[in-house]
Amino acid sequence: MALDAQQVECLLKMIQDTRDLELSCPECAAQLDCYAQRILDGEPIDGLLQMVEQHLNACAGCNDEFHLILETIRAIGESSEA
Ligand SMILES: [Zn+2]
């Protein structure tokens, strides 16, 4: 299945657009505390944190780290409330 030049150009543009929108792993990691806190507080996810959410859906490594942070914040919250 061959792509014509226009399709290739379109695909490349899509890939570039996606890269512009996506966070790198370090950029995502820098926002994870904030993102996890919003989730736990039930606050809306907006702006940069929506990009964090996108990255977590696409990146298993950061998703693992996110769950660790989530558990940690939850544990701290429970121990301080008790
Ligand atoms: Zn990542």
Image (tube, rainbow, N blue to C red):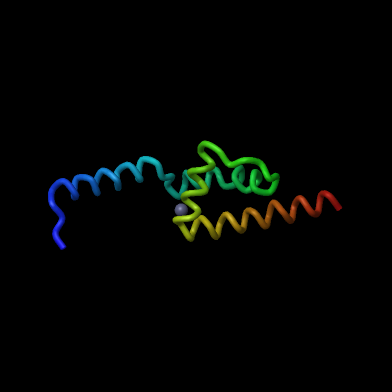
43 with respect to 62 (left or right): right
Q: Residue at x 14, y 59 (%)?
A: 2
Task: Please provide percent x and percent y for residue 15.
Answer: 30, 47
Please tell me which residue lies in front, 26 or 37.
37
Q: Residue at x 50, y 55 (%)?
A: 62
In the rendered image, which quarter contains the N terminus?
A: bottom left
Task: Please provide percent x and percent y for residue 11.
Answer: 24, 49
Tell how many labels. Answer: 0
The image quarter containing residue 16 is top left
Task: Please provide percent x and percent y for residue 32.
Answer: 57, 47
3 with respect to 49 (left or right): left
Task: Please provide percent x and percent y for residue 37.
Answer: 66, 45
Q: Residue furthest bottom?
A: 1
51 with respect to 66 (left or right): left
Q: Residue at x 23, y 45 (%)?
A: 10
Please tell me which residue lies in front, 5 or 38.
5
Q: Residue furthest top?
A: 47
39 with respect to 79 (left or right): left
Q: Residue at x 51, y 38 (%)?
A: 48
